[in-house]
Amino acid sequence: MKAVSIFGIILIAVGIGSLAYFASPMRLMLQETIILHMLNPIPPILGGLALACGIALVYVGLPKIHNRGTNDE
């Protein structure tokens, strides 16, 4: 496995964890915005960005498969 794919998987895990932590039922019951910002170390926008970048890195790290059905000679 390429290092790019491994780093992408790590970013996907961090992104999903951040978004799941932000959307947990206990946190949704909190009303004060100040408390929300103090408790979450990674804002949800950065979690979504980490998720998107992780997916892109895993896609880039996939092995290239040549299409044998075409006759490009």
Image (cartoon, rainbow, N blue to C red):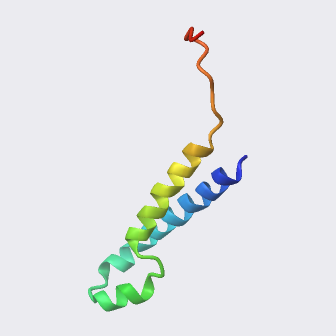
- Residue 17: where, in percent of width, then height? 51, 67
Q: Residue furthest right?
A: 1
How many callouts does the rendering have? Answer: 0
Is 43 situated above or below 31? above
Task: Please indicate whether residue 62 sits to the left or right of residue 30 in the image.
Answer: right
Q: Say which quadrant the C terminus sits in.
A: top right
Closest to the observer, 25 or 33: 33
Q: Residue at x 41, y 76 (%)?
A: 43
> Residue 55, position in %: x, y?
51, 51
Q: Residue at x 65, y 36 (%)?
A: 63
Quick one: which residue is furthest to the front in this view?
Answer: 73
Q: Relative to 26, is 10 on the left or the right?
A: right
Q: Quadrant of residue 27?
A: bottom left
Residue located 60% across and 55% down the image: 9
Q: Residue furthest left?
A: 31
- In which quadrant of the rendered view does residue 72 lie? top right
Residue positioned 36% across, 90% down in the render? 35
Q: Nearer the viewer, residue 8 or 68?
A: 68
**Residue 42 x %, y %:** 46, 77
Residue 44, placed above or below residue 13? below
Residue 23 seen in render: no
Q: Nearer the viewer, residue 20 or 3?
A: 3
Q: Relative to residue 13, is residue 26 drawn left or right? A: left
Residue 59 can be seen, yes or no: yes
Whether residue 35 is situated above or below residue 13 in the rendered picture: below
